[in-house]
Amino acid sequence: MQREPGIWETMKELLLGVRRPLHCIQVGVSSRCVGRCTYCPHTILRERWIDGDMDMDTFSRLWPLMRRSSRVHLQGWGEPLLNPAFFEMTALARRAGCAVSTTTCGLQVDEETASRIVDSGMDIIAFSLAGTDDKSNASRRGISFQQVCDAVKLLQMVRRRKAGVHLEIHFAYLLLASNIDAVRGLPRIMGELGVHAAVVSTLDYIPHPALVQEGFGPNEVQKIANARRVLQETAREAHRLGRDFHWALPFADNPGTVCREDMTRSLYVSWDGSVSPCVYLNLPAEGLDDVTCIFGNVRDENPLEIWERTEYSHFRNRLATSDPDPFCRDCVKRFESVES
């Protein structure tokens, strides 16, 4: 597989610039995870879960897409740093001219890994949280709040030592409806740990009916209003401390014609090479055919041909109408609006 731009391609880019119509390729480089988060399909579907790591040959087949994308995000339904080829993948994506980011639980971040993260040239690493102390973060079983903070502190120490000014450290925070007020502590922790930004999301994928109450449906007006008030107050405090703070909630009057996953300019590739519009439509578990949407596999065909396939293009076009594909019809992501 090609891993470097050719001389004529390089000259053309110098003269005309690089055309990158894709915003992001999300790559699930591993479906393995040591965590046992109570809300995660990895935990709830553990008897049917398929563990695996993407190999370098499969990842290298993404080259034609990477040359047309602004960013590669290395994370899906598992812990990306468990993949032994993670930093080789980062290097290849960087050679393709992409910004590279990842999301981690933090347990694999020792001093050697922290050093490799800074040296890799990736620009964003986000640490996952669902609370702001041990009690409120208890849903992330197997990954204590203190372990995440220690990982951030270690990475910050290495980052400063290496003058890694290119690297931003973020929090990827999951807002659970039963735990709304815990998010108020986020700005203080960001300030103490030097975290640049926080992105707050909700439980948009419900892997078990018992978890419905933890999410936010578009028609749960009062529930959303309460969460919105808390998030607005928290955002003001974060901004006062000089931190970026982004969040999203669904709204009943949202027309539902713009997917927050930006499927018209993004796509998801699972560890096995299968290509889907988003991470929610490609869980690595048996018996989920009715909620799985795959348009091809990069191991078998050119990823650009998959992206340009008539059926896939039609799928994307329907998202901008009031009649999206049945896979997307009831997805909360269609009704969410991002605020800062």
Image (tube, helix red, strand yellow):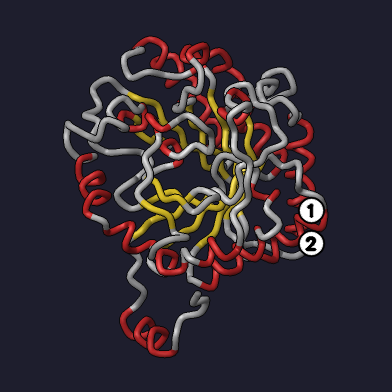
> What residue lies at 68% left-to-right and 63% top-to-bottom?
164
Report whether residue 169 is seen: no
> What residue lies at 68% left-to-right and 23% top-to-bottom?
137
Judged left or right of residue 87, residue 240 is left
Judged left or right of residue 231, residue 92 is right
User: Looking at numbered disc 2 in the image, what kind of residue is underneath it?
Assistant: Arg
Q: Is residue 81 above or below residue 46?
A: below
Q: Which x, y percent locates residue 6?
A: 44, 85
Q: Is residue 193 above or below residue 327?
A: below
User: What residue would you read off at disc 2?
Assistant: 161
> What residue lies at 22% left-to-right and 34% top-to-bottom?
324
Q: Quadrant of residue 186?
A: top right
User: What residue would you read off at disc 1?
Assistant: 157
Q: Which x, y percent locates residue 74?
A: 56, 52
Judged left or right of residue 194, residue 48 is left
Q: Which x, y percent locates residue 8?
A: 38, 89
- Secondary structure beneath dot 1 equals helix
Q: Is residue 173 above or below residue 2?
A: above
Q: Which residue is nearer to you in this view: 218 or 141?
A: 141
The reply to whether callout 2 and callout 1 are in contact (CB within 8 Å) is yes
Query: For the residues marked 2 and 1, what is the alpha-carbon distance in whole angstroms?
Result: 6 Å
User: Looking at numbered disc 1 in the image, what kind of residue is underneath it?
Assistant: Met
